[in-house]
Image (cartoon, helix red, strand yellow):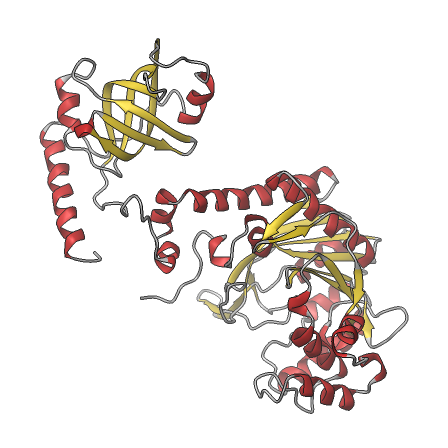
Amino acid sequence: MNDDGDDSLRSVRLGKLEALRALGVEPYPVGFARSDEAGALEVRYATLAPGVETGDTVRVAGRIRAIRNSGMFIDLHDASGKIQVFSHKDYLPETGLATLRLLDIGDLIGVEGKVRRTPRGELTVNAAALTVLAKALRPLPEKYHGLADIELRYRQRYVDLIVNPQSRETLRRRSGIIAAMRGWLTERGYLEVETPMLHAIPGGASAKPFVTHHNALDIDLYLRIAPELHLKRLMVGGLAEKLFEINRCFRNEGLSPRHNPEFTSLELYEAFVDYTAMMRLTETLIAHVAERVTGGSTVTYGGLPIDLTPPWPRRTMAELVRDATGIDFMELDAPTAREAANALASGSPSVELGDEAGWGHALELAFALKVEDRLIQPVHVTGFPRDISPLAKADRNDPRLVERFETYIYGWEIANAFSELNDPLDQRRRFEAQMQARAAGDEEAQPLDEDYVAALEYGLPPCGGLGIGIDRLAMLLTDSPSIRDVIAFPTMRPR
C-alpha cells in the first residue's frame, strides 16, 4: 500500500467484507442480470417530469462513486453514464439495509427498483433490492483531486479509468479510430490479414529489435519491428491485390512523448499503383477518420487548429531544407553534404555524421534539425534519399532518391510510404549495402533476408505500400500530449 492511512482504510474494508459474509451475502457473486444501462434510461425517461414516479422496474449495475445521507442517495456509474439510487426503508427490506451499511465508494453493486424523477430533477431508481457484485478493498482517490500523479495514472491505468472521464474518452476514441480505418479499407476491397510477430530475421524497417529465445527449436527470434516483408510475401503469392494489417510492432529503442517500445500501426499494400496513390489514400483516410471520431476535418492540437481537408501539399525534402537553411543539398556531393549537415548540428557529437555517412544521411540530418518540427499543417514530404530507403523503388529521374514520402503533421511523422522495390537483384544489392553498414556498427541496419529476396524472384507486382502510426494519429485526434495517454498500458520502468 502507499501509506499507513491506506492500510488502515483497507483494514476497515476487510472487516466489512467479513461482515457481509456473516450476513450470508457473497461479496463476489457470479453475475447479475441487468435490464438497462444508465445512459439508456436517461434517453428513455428524458421527458419524465420532476416529482413523477413510474411503475417501471429496472435492474442496473455499476460502481458507487458517491454516497450521501448515510447511503440514502448513491451515485451509480456504469460505462454509459450515471444514475442515482435511492435507498430507504420504505422500499428496501432489512437485509438490504444491512447490506447498505457495509457499502463503500468504489464498490460494484446491482440495484433493482422502480424509476422516478426527484423533485429536483434527478433520474432515480428506488432500490427494492441491493446485490453486492464486488467489494472494493482499496479506496479510490479523493473525489476532487482525482489521480493527479501523471506517472501513477499510467502505472495504475485501472484507477485512472475509474476516476478520470477524459482518460476513458481518449481510449474509446482510439478504438473508434481503428474501427473507422478498418471499415473504410474493407469497404474498398482491402483484405485484412495477420502476419507473424516472431521473426527469424528482423526486417521491414531500420530499428534495433527485441530478442527472445524459442526453447523447443533452440533458436533466437526477434519481436516484429515491421510486418512489411511478410505482407509483400502475401502480395507475391496473390492472396489479394489490396491487403492490410493493423499490427503491433516492437523496437528496442528509447522512450519519449512520441515513442513507446511497442506501438500499433496500419500497414497496407495495393498492386499496380505507385506512391502517389498512397498519398491520396493517406490524406483521404485520415480525413475520414477525423470526421468519424471528431465530427469535422479541422482538429485542435496543443491549442493550434490543424486542417486535415485533402489535398495536402507535396514538398521535397531538399526543397524544405533549402527554404529553411539556404543550402541546396541537390547541388552538393557526399563530403560537402556531410560538412554542411555537421555545421547545422553546431558541433554536437551526438548527431554529427562520420566519414562513412552518405549524401542521403546528410540530407536526412539537415531535415531533422531544421525542418521536421516546423511542419505543423499536413504535408507529404517526398524526395527521400536512397541511402536511407532500402525497400523503396529508385526515383525515375534521380538515382540518389527513391519514390517515397513521409506525411508530417504537427512536426511528427504520421505516415511512411513507397513505390515498393520489386527488382530482386536491386533488392539484394540494397541489403548487402545495409549489411556493410551493420558491420561498420549500425545496429539499426537491416540484415539480408534471403527468403524475402527469393520471394521477389517469383515476381512482386508493382505496388504502393503505406504505414500509418495509429498511436500518433490517436494523439492528434484526442489532443493528447504524450503517447502514454493513448496507450492503455504504456511501457514503464519498474519501481
Q: In the image, residue 213 lies at what x, y percent? A: 46, 68
Tell me residue 374's x, y (percent): 67, 66
The reply to whether residue 151 is in sight is yes
Q: Residue at x 71, y 54 (%)?
A: 234
| Image position, residue 236 (x, y; %) | 76, 56
Asked if 115 appears above or below 275 in the picture, the reply is above
Horizontal arrangement in the rendering, residue 201 relative to residue 453 (left or right): left
Tell which of 28 and 375 is nearer to you.
375
Q: Is residue 420 left or right of residue 476?
A: right
Give above or below for 184 relative to 373: above
Residue 425 appearing in the image? no
Q: Seen from this angle, which residue lies furthest top?
A: 55
**Residue 299 at what x, y percent from top left?**
63, 48
Q: Quadrant of the N terminus?
A: bottom left
Query: Which quadrant, please, contains the C terminus?
Result: bottom left
Residue visible at 77% across and 75% down? 386
Q: With 430 as the anchor, is 482 left or right in this view?
A: left
Which of the pair 334/481 is nearer the observer?
A: 481
